[in-house]
Amino acid sequence: MEVILLENVPSLGKAGDIVQVAVGYGRNFLIPQKLAMEATPQNIRIWEQQREVFRHKKSKELERVREEAQRIESISFTIRRTAGESEKLFGSVTSLDLQKALQEQGIVVDRKKILLPHPLKKLGSYSIPIKLHPEVTAQMNIQIVSDNAEGSANKA
């Protein structure tokens, strides 16, 4: 079965590609999820007419995502946690904590897009990748500081 991809599908193709897939995969997954439409001659004609509008829409979205990535990278986030003597945190910093830090700055990101391989358990500086778009990954710079350092930070 030939389908026209409406969205980027990993290991299959990019939006706008005409690809060959198994009938069951096309009818039971791609088409109901609105990831593709059947590549009939009529649909191909319609797709050709709408392609320019689609490209313009995608380029606008990509531009918006790149601006958001620049905004994330321009902000240095500070997270305060209670820590022991060896700079080990009591608890950890997870992708949910990073999502909340972004929301405080007015940036809405799905926490699944925050590529944190494991919870952070030590004080220090970290650069965490956030996959905002298949073509755009932002680096979130965070500083995890101890609650005990709060008094000395206010004096400086």
Image (spheres, rainbow, N blue to C red):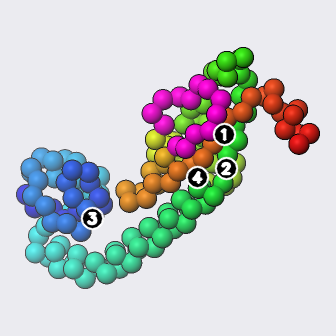
Contact? badges 1 and 3 (CB < 8 Å): no
Mark 4 or mark 1, which has the lower sequence index?
Answer: 4
Q: Which amino acid does label 4 sit on?
A: Val
Query: Crowding near pointer 1: few (<14 within 10 Å), some, many (20+)?
Result: some
**SS assignment at label 3:** loop
To which quarter of the image does residue 117 belong? top left
Q: What stretch is highlighted in magenta?
A: 116-128
- How far separated are the C-alphas under marks 4 and 2? 16 Å
Instruction: Write down the quadrant of residue 47 in the picture.
Output: bottom left
- Residue 76 is marked as 2
* Left or right: where 116 falls relative to 80: left
Q: Residues within 10 Å of mark 2 (few under 14, many from 20)?
A: few
Q: In the rendered image, which residue does mark 1 sit on?
A: 143
State the residue position of label 4: 108
User: Residue 92's mark?
Assistant: none
Q: Is residue 48 left or right of residue 99?
A: left
Residue kind at label 2, given as amino acid type: Ser
Could you say where residue 19 lies in the image, as x and y percent from the top left? Answer: 13, 61
